[in-house]
């Protein structure tokens, strides 16, 4: 009987820059004074966080680590969260003796035992890794987090690499924060402080294209 492999992601290194500059955001909300620059920067961070949480994507380059409870059977692929995938830094697993080892041939120079597949484009799906031809996944120790994959994800290193549609969504979210600074007070006056419906529709396109396409399973028993 096979079991589904659990996967947990943790952020190793966050993005170095915001996805939208304060100057760009101020143009969108028509702000002239610099008195609220700190507040605008906070709205940018809130918009970035909301977009990434709602869509499961990474905007600006960041390093993540995925922990799995085992390897898929034979040559099944491992899809990595947080598209778009840029590259894979390392693939390690805990062997039967409890030692954390790399998935390679152990020679010098090292030949990796896996291949990286990284779809491109603003709606890029999840990237994945799979064993190279003639190689199968190793048998890891039966424990949680036995397989650890560190990778980089994101559209690029600066705001110039962010697709225009995502920049537009972030601008709408920032504008929403600017307009509704006190949601409770606005709602008492009959205003609606929710994310605009059109923005939700645009978010859905990025969300559904980032969902997993395979269910990773293994026949290795959990002991």
Image (cartoon, rainbow, N blue to C red):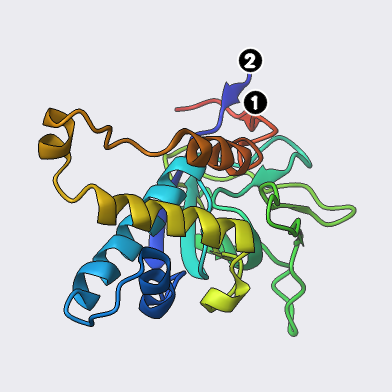
| 163, above or below 123, in the image | below
Secondary structure beneath dot 1 equals loop
Q: Which residue is mark 1?
A: 219
Please state which of residues 105 and 201 is positioned toward the viewer in this rendering: 201
CA–CA distance between discs 2 and 1?
Answer: 6 Å
Q: Residue at x 69, y 50 (%)?
A: 123
| 36, above or below 120, in the image | below
Decide if residue 86 is on the left or right side of residue 6: right
- In percent of width and height, residue 70 lies at 55, 40
Tell me the crowding category of disc 2: few under 14, some 14 to 19, or many 20 or more residues within 10 angstroms, Cα based.
few
Q: Which residue is mark 2?
A: 1
Task: Report the quarter where the N terminus lies.
Answer: top right
Decide if residue 99 is on the left or right side of residue 121: left
Task: State which quadrant residue 49 falls in.
Answer: bottom left
Task: State which quadrant residue 114 falls in.
Answer: bottom right
Q: How many marks?
A: 2
Answer whether labels 2 and 1 touch (C-beta < 8 Å).
yes
Please state which of residues 199 and 88 is positioned toward the viewer in this rendering: 199
- In percent of width and height, residue 18 lies at 41, 72
Badge 2 or badge 1: first in the primary sequence = 2
| 40, above or below 186, in the image | below
Secondary structure beneath dot 2 equals loop
Q: Is residue 17 visible?
A: yes
Task: Report the quarter where the C terminus lies.
Answer: top left
- In percent of width and height, residue 29 lies at 36, 64
Q: Is residue 99 visible?
A: no
Tell me the crowding category of disc 1: few under 14, some 14 to 19, or many 20 or more residues within 10 angstroms, Cα based.
some
């Amino acid at each position: 009987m096979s079991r589904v492999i659990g996967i947990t992601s943790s952020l190793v290194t966050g993005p170095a820059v915001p996805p939208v500059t304060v100057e760009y955001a101020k143009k969108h909300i028509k702000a002239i004074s610099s008195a609220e620059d700190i507040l605008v920067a906070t709205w940018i961070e809130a918009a970035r966080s909301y977009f990434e949480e709602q869509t499961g994507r990474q905007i600006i380059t960041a390093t993540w680590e995925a922990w799995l409870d085992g390897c898929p059977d034979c040559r099944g692929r491992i899809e990595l969260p947080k598209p778009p995938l840029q590259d894979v830094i390392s693939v390690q697993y805990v062997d039967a003796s409890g030692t954390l080892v790399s998935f390679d041939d152990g020679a010098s120079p090292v030949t990796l035992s896996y291949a990286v597949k990284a779809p491109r484009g603003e709606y890029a799906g999840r990237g994945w890794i799979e064993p190279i031809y003639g190689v199968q996944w190793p048998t890891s120790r039966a424990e949680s987090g036995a397989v650890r994959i560190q990778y980089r994800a994101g559209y690029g290193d600066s705001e110039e690499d962010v697709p225009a549609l995502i920049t537009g969504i972030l601008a709408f979210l920032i504008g929403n924060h600017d307009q509704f600074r006190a949601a409770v007070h606005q709602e008492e006056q009959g205003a609606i402080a929710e994310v605009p419906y059109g923005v939700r529709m645009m978010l859905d396109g990025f969300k559904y294209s980032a969902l997993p396409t395979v269910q990773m399973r293994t026949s290795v028993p959990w002991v």
